[in-house]
Amino acid sequence: TAISVANSTNTQVLRNTITAGKDKEVDWNGDGLPESTSVSGILISGNYAGNNMVADNQVSNYTSIINPSNAVALWCDSGGYSNTYQRNRVFDFQGYGFNIESRCADNIVQENLSYRNRYGFSTAGFWVNETPRTQWLNNVAYGNTYAGFTMEKSAGNVMKNNISANNGSSQVY
């Protein structure tokens, strides 16, 4: 992870350029085989990570050696709440452009551009807790290989004035 905001409030992550990162092969469980943690450009996580601003950043060209789908440009994980993600550009990720995930509530994702990733914008998958009350406003997803917007396990989310074009198998899933 290039920038991690863990259990922090009222933090601003502004106008950064993050490029060309990759994970390391680490044997976490001692079985002699490499595992990989998720690779992210900017990560906000923890039950106390709230009221943060992530704006005007560019995150690109991250890869994951072990599991390519684990790469995430901008990621809210494990309880981040009331954060704002705006005017960010993310591209050329093997995984997710934006992933607002498990127990991340009341976030605003607005005026962002996500292209040439696997997924443009995504919420929690079937394997984690839901993503409640996120607002998805005026975002653009273009040329992502799987989907522009993937809204799974989303409760009370609002999608308004977004553009999803030329994405692989689905514009909105």
Image (spheres, rainbow, N blue to C red):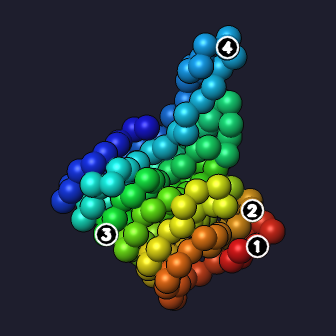
Which amino acid type is shown beneath numbered disc 2? Tyr
Drawn side of residue 43 relative to residue 165, left or right: left
Mark 4, residue position: 31
Res. 82 mark = 3
Image coordinates of residue 19 in percent, x first then y, are: 47, 41
* Residue 1 picture quarter: top left
Of residues 139 and 79, the one drawn nearer to the viewer in this rendering: 79
The numbered mark, 4 or 2, whose residue comes first in the sequence reads: 4
Task: Give the CA separation, mark 1 to mark 2.
Answer: 6 Å
Q: Residue at x 67, y 14 (%)?
A: 31
Which amino acid type is shown beneath numbered disc 1? Ser
Mark 2, residue position: 146
Mark 1, residue position: 170
Q: Are marks 3 and 2 in contact (CB under 8 Å)?
A: no
SS for callout 4: loop
**On screen, 121 above or below 92?**
below
The numbered mark, 4 or 3, whose residue comes first in the sequence reads: 4
